[in-house]
Image (cartoon, rainbow, N blue to C red):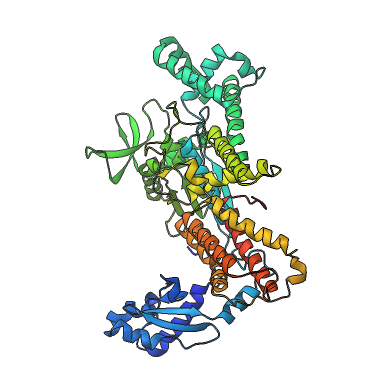
Amino acid sequence: MQWSNSSLLTSQLSEVFKDLIEKTYPELSKDQILASLEITPCRQSSLGHYQCNSALKLSKLLKDNPRSIAEKLSPKASNFIASCDIAGPGFINVTLSNAFLENALNTLIEDPRLGIKPTSNSKRVVVEFSSPNTAKELHVGHLRSTIIGDSLARLFEFLGHDVLRLNHIGNWGTPFGMLIQYLRIHQPEVLSGKEKTNLSHLANWYKESRKLFDNDEEFKKSSQKQVVKLQAHDPDAISAWNKICEISRSGYQEIYDLLDVKITERGESYYHKLLPKVVKLFEEKKLVEVSDGAKCIFLDNFVTKEGSPLPIIIQKTDGGYNYATTDLSALYQRINEEKADRIIYVVDNGQSLHFQMVFRAAKLAGYYKPDKIEVDHVPFGLVLGSDGKKFKTRSGDSEKLIDLLNNAIAKAADILKERESSSSHIDEASKVLGINAVKYADLSSLRTKDYMFSYEKMLQFEGNTAAFLLYAYVRIVSIQKKASFDFASLKSEKIVLSDPTEVELALMVLQLREILEAVAYSLLPNRLCDFLYQLAEKFNSFFRDCPVINSEHQNSRLLLCELVKRTFEIGFSILGLRTVSRM
Ligand code: ARG
């Protein structure tokens, strides 16, 4: 599926090399030429801006050595290309011309989106993320899902797709029977709404109710009755269930507000009515086998550790449905009712097997064709403490998410107080810095790996951190302030690149699109983080080498700073990071 349409630097270069190959080697077919085209950023920026690897790829086909092919394929200097060098076994390194880069930048001066138009090929993208379980606190795994999912949703929105953000809350099933029964006995005022409470209390009562369920036969029986009532949509049971969901919801909302995350709740209960229909669908397709009284789907190549076939159980002997049945129904609904073109599940690594099986079963049942609809599990690793073990607080309990976020904000405040005396900005700045730090630490690490949570590291002002990036951004704001930058009066001026550090910045501004598309394809936000980190470093070199105010290049440099600032802003907003104008 294509996620882009307009022309990137790499595609412009591809055109140049395609023409050259066609002219030099008319004997090659179109497909052979296309297959040989590979343009990547130069591995060493001192050698050029981009490299073309075609000579190496064509060597076997043309029975010639790659360096001699590279010589024939080197483009002449033009308005676009300043120079070109052959390196190593036959890489063609290309340096773009200043005139081209200046011109490209100057066309962006009045464009807040830096030339990245919303796609004309808009797709319906479902991003499912966060998805905690009712009556339980969110844990750090849900935090990762929330941060990564929000960022991917923001990216697709920015690129112009129609995004549906879904919170697949675990809000249905047997645990509600125990909790309702417990609250009826011990907290009737909570159920009636007379007494207000919060998610923390609810989570404790949930634990209590489980203890009772395991140890008290009578309690167990009445809990099971509550489940039956709930499933039969008995008004009393439903009203108790609603109360529980409402208390949980306001607990989650507190966190989403702090994180500035928008998401639509669509929990497991939403698919309740669809479950029998989906089971029937699988039965009609003859994909269901009854094993020990349970309805199962057996899939090739899925086996247990012992080597016996591993089925998806879609209906238990007692008639109850499973987690997988809900997921098969949700997928069905997203394809057939939401008309999704792409569906993304941001859920931890631990559920990979589950999703592989659900997707395989759905394909077998003919829900979707992989070339028409893209369905991806976007897995992520664990959050580890500094001891390398699963992240926990000292008490041994998983730290409450809200405490963790507030801790990050408090630590950010301490750091900011140390750095500057004026306290008027500290409240706001520490909130921004603390939350940014938590988000950025997560997004900048390769999501498929476990990542180590450290307040100390994430709040540093050096290295690949939110504070380092934000600091570069704030530098630009302060240059603009000192220069009384007035965009309206400068926008008709032109950018001229006179210093190598300016050329490097120019190139990065023009590469933003390439990076966003690479992230939309790979679903790896750390690539955008790496890019912004490089941008910050390059901006710092520019700041060191190029005076702005009162230099002969003041206007040009102010405009260049403005484009860099917008590059940061677009990047930050896609990562869900907020900015400050002072630090
Ligand atoms: N509620 C689940 C949990 O906390 C995550 C749900 C993931 N999404 C899904 N469609 N199964 O582990």
Q: Residue at x 40, y 49 (%)?
A: 448
Tell which residue pokes out farthest to the right in this image. Answer: 489
Q: Residue at x 42, y 89 (%)?
A: 23
Q: Give left or right: position of 562 versus 449.
A: right
Q: Residue at x 47, y 24 (%)?
A: 175
Q: Residue at x 54, y 11 (%)?
A: 185
- Position of 488 relative to 378 (above/below): below
| Residue 355 position in % (x across, y down) | 40, 44
Quadrant for residue 450, please give it: top left
- Position of 250 relative to 449 (above/below): above
Q: Give left or right: position of 237 versus 68.
A: right
Quadrant for residue 28, please give it: bottom left
Q: Nearer the viewer, residue 135 or 404?
A: 404
The answer to whether any part of residue 494 appears in the image is: yes
| Residue 180 position in % (x across, y down) | 53, 19
Q: Nearer the viewer, residue 449 or 160?
A: 449
- Position of 555 relative to 429 (above/below): below
The answer to whether any part of residue 262 appears in the image is: no
Mark count: 0
Q: Give left or right: position of 277 versus 579.
A: left
| Residue 481 position in % (x across, y down) | 72, 60
| Residue 288 position in % (x across, y down) | 34, 39
